Image (cartoon, rainbow, N blue to C red):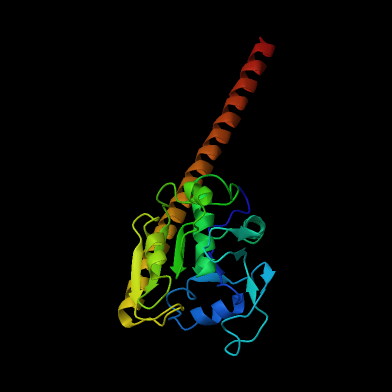
Amino acid sequence: MEGRTDEKRRMKILGLHGFRTSGSFLEKQISKWDPSIFHHHFDMDFPDGLYPAGGKSDIEGIFPPPYFEWFQFEKDFTVYTNLEECISYLCEYMTSKGPFDGLLGFSQGATLSALLMGYQAQGKVLKDHPPIKLFVSISGSKFRDPSICEIAYKDPIKVRSVHFIGAKDWLRLPSEDLATSFHNPLIIRHPQGHTVPRLDEDAVEKLRGWTKEILSNDRDNGEAKIENGNLHEAACKILVEESGDLMVKTEAGVAEMTQA
């Protein structure tokens, strides 16, 4: 029982960047959001994709290289290359550097994040990692391979999720479709295109309320675990005391029998 601490760790979020960008670029994109939403409450981790960019990046001239991609795909998004390797890499990363409480992703990163959560819910991956509690999807979509869909989106994914959907985003409809795969999703619409949007006051308030509720639930669960731990500790103490008392009584009885 000694050495146990009741100090609550900060929740941790893994951020997965878009196709042919980088973890540093996504971190910079998210930094334009009010820090009271995420950075004041969560530890954020923005790794680079597993593979160097295999072609031109859309952010050349906007943000310095190097650029990365998580996996490769055909134009119709039904044939993928290095996807299994990417999934294995991320599962190992999350297990060794986590645990992570949530995932945040943009475009390819959001699509990949949703896949990981769907697979985890079906017991396919991350079996030794605690269930993901929250998900922030920015311009995410579903995989279109039927063999993936039959598993990942088989049932509504019971993870607290918020989905940013842009009116001018070429992935607007796929993003809306992805949101339907989650239980009771929060949808925040914005007038921009395929980007991490700047947030107006209404979006900030919605997102701040969303994170506040998640933090409150996590804190309540943590306090319940501590309380249960204290009750268990007290029960063990009583059991030890009663066992010691019984031993004393037994030894006294043996002594009496010896004297007799």
- Residue 139 in picture, x, y percent from top left: 45, 70
Residue pictured at 66% horizontal, 9% vertical: 260
Residue found farthest to the top: 260
Left or right: where 31 falls relative to 47: left
Which is nearer the eye, 30 or 140? Answer: 140
Rendering coords of residue 171 (x, y %) = 43, 70
Residue located 61% across and 76% down the image = 22
* Res 147 seen here: yes
Q: Is residue 130 above or below residue 10?
A: above
User: How many circles with numbers are drawn on the protein?
Assistant: 0
Instruction: Indicate whether 209 appears above or below 79.
Output: below
**Residue shown at the point (61%, 75%) measured from the top left:** 20
Q: Quadrant of residue 49?
A: bottom right
| Rendered position, 58 above or below 61 | above
Comparing 134 with 170, the one in front is: 170
Task: Name the image quarter holding residue 137.
Answer: bottom left
Provide residue 257's location: percent of width, then percent of height: 65, 12
The answer to whether residue 8 of the structure is visible from this angle is no
- Along the line of sight, the residue nearer the viewer: 258 or 209: 209
- As drawn, is 107 to the left or to the right of 23? left
Identity of the residue furthest to the bottom in this view: 61
Rendered position, 114 above or below 211: above
